[in-house]
Amino acid sequence: MEGGNQSSISEFILLGLSNQPKQERLLFFLFLIMYLITVLWNTLIILAIKTDSRLHTPMYFFLSNLSLVDIFFTCSTVPKMLANHISGNKAISYNKCLTQVFFFSWFGGLDSIILASMAYDRYVAICAPLHYSMIMTPKVCVHLVAVCWFWACVNALIQTLSLTRLSFCGHNVIPHFFCDLSVVIRLACSDTYLNDLMIYTVGGLTAIMPFIGILISYMRIFVAVLKIQSAHRKQKAFNTCGSHIAVVCLFYGTVIGVYFNPTSTHTAQKDTASAVMYTVVTPMLNPFIYSLRNNDMKGALKMLFTKKLSLSP
């Protein structure tokens, strides 16, 4: 049964977050509000960075890309979940499920790589400040982001294409609110060794290697900051990294808990709760974390609102 996809299943059933009508209605409005906040606030971050020339720096260039990715990341799962709640139909076709796996894997992987790029930017800014403008040139930043988008896309394509070789013989119920790669694999009735290998190798390169890069960057940053004599300069250096560290902990804490724990420790409830954290909650909180702790960003947002109000009739 491994010579290609011999699936007799034309659709999957997404159980969602609850099977109780009252809870479903409450969750629908809750996730709708969170989704709208995510899209609106991340869009405001992008517009603020674009319109304020003071924020045309590598750090904010990466932040605008992170906000864009967070919008796409949330859009890969939440709209379908909301549509299922409205229609009452929890089915998703086989092809649409694979499409969702692709975009979810693409933007999820891209999130981790861009976070690593941001960590490298902070490392250069703190550990090599005199060479920062020569190292982090606009051309280098654009090329770095382009590589991030390309590699994450390649990983998503590999993971999705590897699913097409699996057979699904009858069990088509997904105890989740979206087509998660690892959950779909567990439904297959054919050998999944190659798929598991792809997750832990190619997928691992996309998730774990950036995480290792982040750890190395911050270890060197920590050592460099300890050598600073001025307490004020130390505080300033840590403040420039605080928001990024908070986002990294929020994102990787849940991702590692879901995808890099032994299968025996997984439960549907635990995986779903963790998935809600990094697919919905984290993209919503990211712009708040960066804007509320950053005076430049607060100033840019205030200027953006002022412009909008002055242009309105």
Image (cartoon, rainbow, N blue to C red):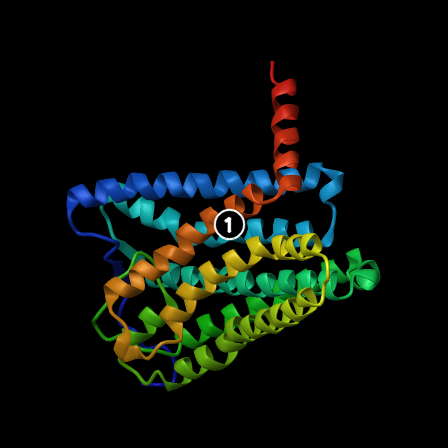
Q: Position of residue 83 (x, y in %)?
A: 32, 45
Q: Residue at x 68, y 64 (%)?
A: 225
Quadrant the C terminus occupies: top right
Depth order, front residue of 39/210: 210
Is residue 78 found left or right of 52 in the rendered image? left
- Residue 205 visible in the picture: yes
Depth order, front residue of 87/242: 242
Image quadrant assignment for residue 95: bottom left
Image quadrant assignment for residue 253: bottom left
The relative height of residue 189 versus residue 61 in the rendered view (above or below) is below
Q: Position of residue 163 (x, y in %)?
A: 40, 74
Identified by mark 1, the residue type is Asn
Is residue 271 found left or right of 115 in the rendered image? left
Image quadrant assignment for residue 302: top right
Depth order, front residue of 142/94: 142
Q: Position of residue 144 (x, y in %)?
A: 70, 64
Task: Residue under label 1, please give it.
Answer: 286
Quadrant the N terminus occupies: bottom left
Q: Residue at x 26, y 58 (%)?
A: 14
Q: Residue at x 49, y 77 (%)?
A: 204
Is residue 19 found left or right of 123 in the rendered image? left
Count of numbered labels shown in the rendering? 1
